[in-house]
Structure formats: C-alpha cells, structure tokens
Image: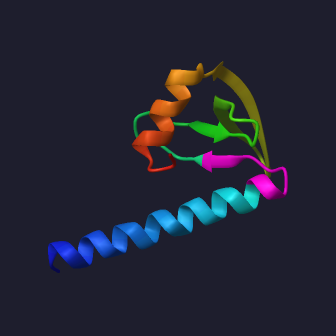
C-alpha cells in the first residue's frame, strides 16, 4: 500500500471518528477514547462541555461500574485530543 493510500485511509478514519464524536455530543453522550498509554481498565471519557476524565471501568458480572480517577486540566485535555486527531 502506498503512502498516499495510507494517508487517505487515515483521513477517512479521522473523519469517521470525528463524526461519531459529534453524534455522541449531539445526544448528550460522552465519547469514549481507548488508549494503550493508560493502565489496563482505564479509559478517557470526553464530554460535550469539553471535560475529559480518566475513568476506571470494572466488570461486575453482567454490569460495568466506572469511577473517575482524574479530571484533566485544559492543556492535558487538549493534548489528548491532539494525540487522537480530535482537534
């Protein structure tokens, strides 16, 4: 696969992700960002108000529980958005 083809696929991927994110926000739902840089069981959750939280997700049988580990500050949140192509 050529560099141009890879770049085109990456752009299509980012457009899809951004559309899903906007759709979630329009329904007042958070956007889940999975990251290999976080410890296992932790995720980023971005909210329409711009807040990003690191949450721990724990499975309890058929149910899942979450707890907030940290609320990211403005620059930290922007850094996460930039890393995932969301800016």
Quadrant of the drawing holding the N terminus: bottom left
Q: Left or right of 54: which side holds 10?
A: left
Give 63 or 18, whichever is nearer the viewer: 18
Tell me which corner region of the image, top left, top right, bottom left or bottom right, holds residue 68: top right
Which residue is at a point 59% across and 37% down the rendered structure image? Answer: 44
Give 83 or 39, whichever is nearer the viewer: 83
Please tell me whether residue 75 belongs to the stretch shown in magenta: no
| Residue found at the far right of this picture | 27
Q: Left or right of 76: which side holds 63?
A: right
Specify start and end residues of the magenta stretch as a single range. Answer: 25-32
Q: Position of residue 13 (x, y in %)?
A: 45, 68
Can residue 75 be seen in the rendering of this structure? yes
Can residue 39 be seen in the rendering of this structure? no
Q: Position of residue 5 (x, y in %)?
A: 24, 79
Which residue is at a point 74% across and 34% down the rendered structure image? Answer: 66
Q: Left or right of 78: which side holds 46?
A: right
Please tell me whether residue 30 belongs to the stretch shown in magenta: yes
């Amino acid at each position: 696969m050529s560099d141009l083809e890879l770049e085109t696929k990456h752009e299509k991927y980012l457009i899809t992700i951004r559309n899903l994110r906007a759709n979630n926000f329009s329904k007042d739902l958070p956007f889940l960002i999975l990251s290999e840089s976080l410890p296992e069981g932790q995720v980023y959750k971005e909210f329409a108000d711009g807040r990003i939280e690191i949450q721990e997700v724990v499975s309890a049988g058929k149910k899942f529980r979450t707890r907030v580990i940290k609320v990211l500050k403005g620059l930290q949140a922007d850094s996460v958005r930039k890393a995932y192509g969301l800016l």
